[in-house]
Amino acid sequence: MSQSNHNNPHNPKEQKDKLNSYARFSSIAIQMFAIIGIGTYLGVKLDEYYPNKHNLYTLVLSLLSVILSIVFVIRRIIAASKDNS
């Protein structure tokens, strides 16, 4: 009785695919946090340089960086799903 490679949990190709998937999505998460962090940092620095009552630069740049990072993640996931099909 031979087992198929799909049911074998020790299949090297399957393990490699899982590791590649983890690496891809963890790098996307790190890039997302970096985009948000840089946008927020720039907003804080602009608010320090050009003071205003409501810290508008921080608010606007942090929101824009969150939107930008979400768009980035969606585009990367779509590209990854096209590569796998």
Image (cartoon, grey):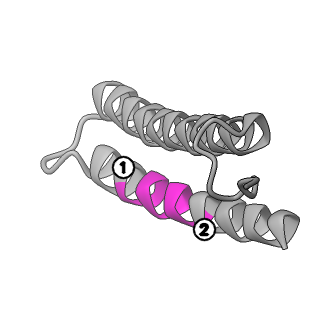
Residue closer to the observer: 19 or 40 = 19
Label 1 environment density (alpha carbons within 10 Å; few <14, some 14–19, many ≥20): many
- Is 56 displayed left or right of 16 in the figure? left
The numbered dot on residue 12 is none
> Does the stretch in magenta take in 66?
yes
Splitting the image into 4 quarters, where does residue 10 fall? top right
Q: Is 40 displayed left or right of 69 in the figure?
A: left
- Total numbered circles: 2
Q: Looking at the picture, how far across and down is residue 9, in whole percent?
A: 58, 43
Q: Is residue 16 left or right of residue 85?
A: left
**In the visual, does 72 lie left or right of 67?**
right
| Residue name at image x 75 percent, y 34 percent | 12
46 within the magenta span: no
Q: Nearer the viewer, residue 14 or 20?
A: 14
In space, the residues marked 2 and 1 are separated at their CA atoms by 18 Å
Q: Nearer the viewer, mark 2 or mark 1?
A: 2
SS state under label 2 = helix
- The residue tagged 2 is 74
Magenta-tinted stretch:
63-71
Q: Which residue is mark 1?
A: 62
Q: Amino acid at mark 1?
A: Ser
| Residue 72, horizontal then vertical, whole percent | 63, 58
